[in-house]
Amino acid sequence: MEILYIVVPCYNEADCLPQTAPVFRRKLDELEKSGIISAESRILLVDDGSVDGTWDVIRSLHESDPAFVGLRLSPNRGHQNAVMAGLMEAKTRASVTICMDADLQDDINAMNGMMEKYAEGFPIVCGVRTSRATDTFLKRVTAQGYYALMNLFGAKIIYNHADYRLMDKTALEKLSLYHEDNPFLRGLATRLGLPIATVEYKRTPRVAGESKYTLKKMMNLAMRGFTCARCKPQDTPRPPDPHIAERLFS
């Protein structure tokens, strides 16, 4: 059985986590009872420098249930850095990871399909949205052109895939050779030279709270996408993130 770490970046999710954490826990239980994953599997919550008590919620979850573990970054480092910090921490502890946002807009049941594809031999499995009905009009209009431009500039990314993704230990080892600050993970995932499968799912509205992706943050992410094609792997793994201020592990 595989040791699965579900990596969940969290920024100001104090209102959201009490509602979504039980859903993550039930999915972990389901996968464990089905014999797919080990009882050593965990939900890794990465607090990206929140200012609303998110870390207090994570600490409380960990104290009441060792299946919840945590990292706290200080200061706020941004979504991609939070995901990368979580993945690199999980790399030493897990055989397979799935990264997913805390708001559960991505269908958590798609994890079952991801694990099936992994069992078939795919070290990377990307969740792909079947619809953009929950997006704003502007986001829907610009999305197709954005993906086309990314591919034109050499950042080979999968259309309608963001950061809902399974990566096994081999994929994480290859990812660790990229040392970029503020990485563009959906672009790097397709550059690791490993087979990739996809699983489709429908996206839903946020369970609680508001989206943390402002227009400025989306523009910054787009710019990182343009520079992703020039990223080169190094000979040694990236060092531990110096911005990890605290760890909670059982």
Image (cartoon, rainbow, N blue to C red):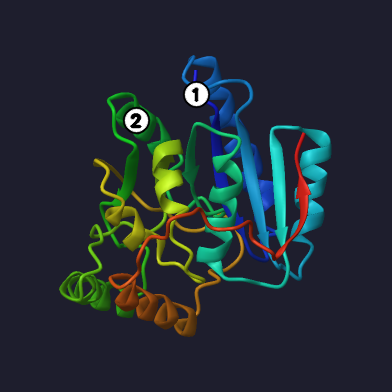
Looking at the image, residue 220 lies above or below residue 14: below
Q: How many marks on residues?
A: 2
Residue 211 location (% of width, % of height): 53, 69
Mark 2 lies on residue: 118
Q: In the image, residue 190 lies at what x, y percent?
A: 28, 54
Which sits in the foreground, 30 or 74?
74
Residue 147 appears left or right of 211: left
70 or 108, which lies in front? 70
From mark 1 to mark 2, how far is it between C-alphas? 11 Å
The residue pinned by badge 1 equals 2
Do the numbered discs 1 and 2 sit on residues whose CB atoms are within 8 Å?
yes
Mark 1 and mark 2 lie on one chain; the one further toward the N terminus is 1
For badge 1, the amino acid type reads Glu
Q: Residue at x 62, y 39 (%)?
A: 43
Indicate whether 217 appears above or below 89.
below
On the image, the x and y values in percent for residue 12 come to 68, 66
For the point 29% across and 50% down, which residue is it?
128
Q: Residues within 10 Å of mark 1 (few under 14, many from 20)?
A: some
| Number of other residues with Cα within 10 Å of mark 2, as a class: few under 14, some 14 to 19, many 20 or more | some
Q: Which mark is residue 49?
A: none
Residue type at mark 2 is Tyr
Residue at screen point 51% across, 22% down: 37
Residue 145 coordinates in the image, percent (x, y):
20, 76
